[in-house]
Image (cartoon, rainbow, N blue to C red):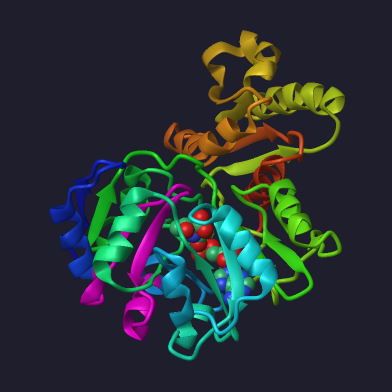
Amino acid sequence: MGGEVIPVDPIHPDPAVIERAAAIIRRGGLVAFPTETVYGLGANALDEDAVRSIYEAKRRALDDPLIVHVATMAELGGIVAELPNTARVLADRFWPGPLTLVLPKVPVIPDIATANLPTVAVRIPSHPVAQALIRAAGLPIAAPSANLFTRTSATTAEHVVQDLGDRVNLVLDGGPASHGIESTVVAAQRNEARLLRPGATTPEAIADALSALDPTVPLLLGAVGRTASPGLMAKHYSPRASLFLLTGEPSETRPALRRAVERALEAGRQVGVLLVDEDAPLLEDLGDRISVEPLGSEADLGQVASRLFAAMRSLDAAGCDAIYVRALDTSGLGLAILDRLTRAAHADEFTA
Ligand code: TXA
Ligand code: MG
């Protein structure tokens, strides 16, 4: 199919390259492109066959709907039937950026893009390459994360090629995605908003924006079923190695991490660890008996989030068969980090 990778400047992409990519989108092909969250696998959202080819390339289950990306608020009218006040307030505050809003759809959006739901997920990305591509194509672009279904999301063009190879016509390589974790998905209704997937926009920031609209409009957190949020499969974001997540108080999980790593080494496993800087002394003496991927300081969850998926892929590439990680604080971006780790740690195969 091609699978060509073209480097683009992430701030000032070459219009000729963008036009080539846009032409592929217009004729129903697949283009992987950088966004500020993760790489997306894009196709014309209005073309049923093109959208189907996204699912095929990712081997994605057809009951997991896609996000439709537009460049400006002016294009929303062609996608959503209604924009409640809650949605308008969140759009004003966070777009362009890492927020996805689930809203009633218009009929022109093919059912396959929304897995037959009456709603559509929509986002205005801020990345200049994503913006330029959508504008040049002149179409809304449906794009899930550009990884194989249930696997670790792609935060670089190299990850896209590892997973999708020549099943995509063109990969625009704009360097590493800056947030490194997906957008926050929110279902915005008239009198409430519900967090469907934690992500790069924090729940605290969303609640703050809502309370500026009306202090009685809540952001509902907590358990969301697969009916409301089909992407919430138990197994998701997983590296090939088994990932073990140690949850609890740091005073317990720090020594538990050390013990778990020792036991795995005794059992002859190839051990990898996703490690915050503060925990480095815990495992220092093990030297090169283990592979360590530094996540940065636990005080900088933005950095932890941006390194997380790439770090899992590095440990896979290093041949690890068991990856250990300690759960961190869940405030701010911590909720999204814990969500990804929890799903990545799920050992069973996904059954839809
Ligand atoms: O940051 C992102 O959101 C990236 C970039 C490429 O924009 N995209 C992304 O797409 O993460 P994907 O397909 O990996 O995740 C889409 C999420 C899934 O959890 C899906 O279930 C949810 O959005 N979703 C899509 N349409 C929905 C709908 N109509 N109702 C509820 N959830 C929906
Ligand atoms: Mg995904």
Q: Position of residue 76 (x, y in %)?
A: 47, 74
Q: In the shown orientation, is residue 315 left or right of residue 336?
A: left
| Residue 274, image x, y percentages | 60, 30
Q: Nearer the viewer, residue 185 or 309?
A: 185
**Near-viewer residue (9 or 152):** 9
Residue furthest left in the image: 16
Q: Is residue 115 above or below residue 303?
A: below
On whether residue 58 falls in the magenta region, the answer is no
Region in magenta: 25-54
Foreground pick, 123 / 177: 123
Picture residue at 63% right of the left edge, 60% below the top = 90
Image vertical order of residue 301 relative to residue 87, above or below: above
Q: Quadrant of the C terminus?
A: bottom right
Q: Is residue 192 left or right of residue 239?
A: right
The question of residue 29 being in magenta is answered with yes
Q: Residue furthest bottom?
A: 107
Q: Residue at x 52, y 34 (%)?
A: 307
The percent coordinates of residue 348 (x first, y second) are 66, 58
Quarter-wise, where is residue 138 in the image?
bottom left
